[in-house]
Amino acid sequence: MSPASPAMNLDFSAIAPVAIVAMGAMAVLVLEVFLARMRSLSEFHVSVALALVATLALVLALGTAGQAFLQGTSSVFNADNPMLRLDRFSAFATVVVGIGALLSVWMSMQYLIELRINHGEHYALLLISTAGMMVLVAAVDILTVFLGLEILSLPIYVLAGFDRRKTTSNEAAMKYFLVGTFATALLLYGTALLYGTTGETGLDGIRAAFPSDNPLALAGLGLVVVGLAFKVSAAPFHQWTPDVYEGAPTSVTGFMSVTVKAAAFAALLRFAGGDVEPAAENLGRILWGIALLSMVLGNITAVVQDNVKRMLAWSAVAHAGYVLVGFTAGAPGHGAVLFYLAAYLFANLGAFAVIVALADRGRDQDRIESFAGLARRRPGMAALMTLFLLSLAGLPGTVGFIAKFQIFSVAVRAEELSLAIVAVLTTVVSFYYYLRVPVWMYMRDPGETPPRAGLDTPEAAVLSACAIAVLLLGFFPNGGFPVPVLQDATVLAWAHEAAAALR
């Protein structure tokens, strides 16, 4: 008998979500060429057609990942050389990333027209970046981690500067590119050191062979963490965050603020998820310090911000710290981390969606003064913004409270009392700057420049989806939704089941 072909060892179901999204990106680019020649179609119709193609690709990818999660299967693309694995953990993270990308597509449709930057490559770049995130969350080899980071990063650099007419957008893209390139170089050097000291590139192999008494191995571990900490906006690797969040188009800011953070944290969870000493012990010490600095610096600096996008940027730094508190609790905290990422997605993306819905004739209404008297002009928008900000703060009755309670609880059970106390105190501080916006909306007179009066259907869908998720997951995190189709959606339990796949 002839030897088996190498192709027989390939399981394409492991890369199905990535492949679907990547093909969707190619379809968007090809379709735009044909639609551009049809002069009978308006700019809006072209945008809708491209967004529908992107939506179809993301829905198919979400369905594939969701089915893999519910079936509890685990598939490896190449069993002889494991690089990508679609298991319950990567399927859950893929769904979180995919939902964030899908809502971002809908959020962008009218916004791009409003800012006069409606170009089809926006949706293609968004899909390519999403494909990179899906590679990252499924990576089980340090080289694939690097590949996923690069695929997700390069389109994001372009999207940050998508509004080429604005200096702030160009500046955001340049800063993000330069700092991102430096962080990527550090991660790549760390990868080389880990391979040199362990002889492994697989994440399981690195953890098992990690020599704790080798300074080069410790340096490599630290450099890899730095590269990922940059992506999640954790201090002290956060310097790019406020400027990029402010300068990039708001729909792009919303997209990167939730999906990139979720993907990078998932990669870090995969790296630290196995209880294999001594790598986990050394990694825990590093993450403890980053978590403390992120919570303190992020919340204190957010207090003095007068631009809502910059305030949310510093808030993102603080939330990275809260997520890292779950890392310090070890394996029991990993499920809480995944649920926190899902909760943060709906609350934070909802807040950016409100800013998108208020943009008018090429101008973002992102100054805090722009929200003055909004409750009189747009009471629905004011109520939604208040809901999302209160969820980010962690008010009971919202998904943000459940997420923070989960994180703080596992920290206490792991006897990380000092870190838990700092987390609670900084959460109290966060109520001040989150509530500043509702004060301006409900207790100040309207300004001279009114926000956009209308609300596009896709924008309404995004706002509705985020608001429903914030409330339903806040009251029913373990299922029992008063909606038949969602009654069995036990998201909190699913997050813990996904984390269990790491062990």
Image: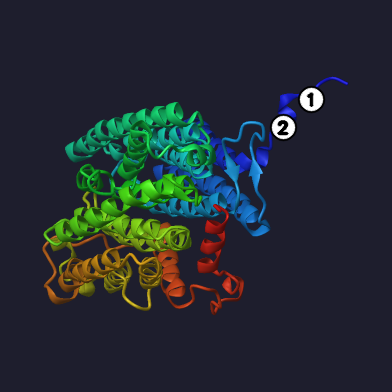
Give the residue displayed 18% in from the left and 62% down from the top. 450
Badge 2 crowding class, 10 Å Cα cut-off, few under 14, some 14 to 19, many 20 or more, is some
Give the residue displayed 47% in from the left and 41% down from the top. 127
In this view, 187 is above or below 328: above
* Residue assigned mark 2: 9
Give the residue displayed 17% in from the left and 59% down from the top. 302
Q: Is residue 435 visible?
A: yes
Image check: 469 left or right of 82?
left
Residue 247 location, x and y as percent? 22, 44
In this view, 295 is above or below 216: below
Q: Quadrant of residue 344?
A: bottom left
Residue 320 location, x and y as percent? 31, 54
* Residue assigned mark 1: 4
Q: Quadrant of residue 439?
A: bottom left
Find out whether the residues at labels 1 and 2 contact each other: C-beta distance under 8 Å: yes
**Amino acid type shown at disc 2:** Asn
**Amino acid type shown at disc 1:** Ala
Q: Is residue 113 visible?
A: no
Residue 176 location, x and y as percent? 26, 37
Image check: 173 left or right of 278?
left
Badge 1 crowding class, 10 Å Cα cut-off, few under 14, some 14 to 19, many 20 or more, is few
Helix or strand or loop: what does disc 1 sit on?
loop
Q: Residue furthest front?
A: 213
In this view, 176 is above or below 254: above
Q: Residue furthest top?
A: 2
Q: Quadrant of the N terminus?
A: top right
Helix or strand or loop: what does disc 2 sit on?
helix
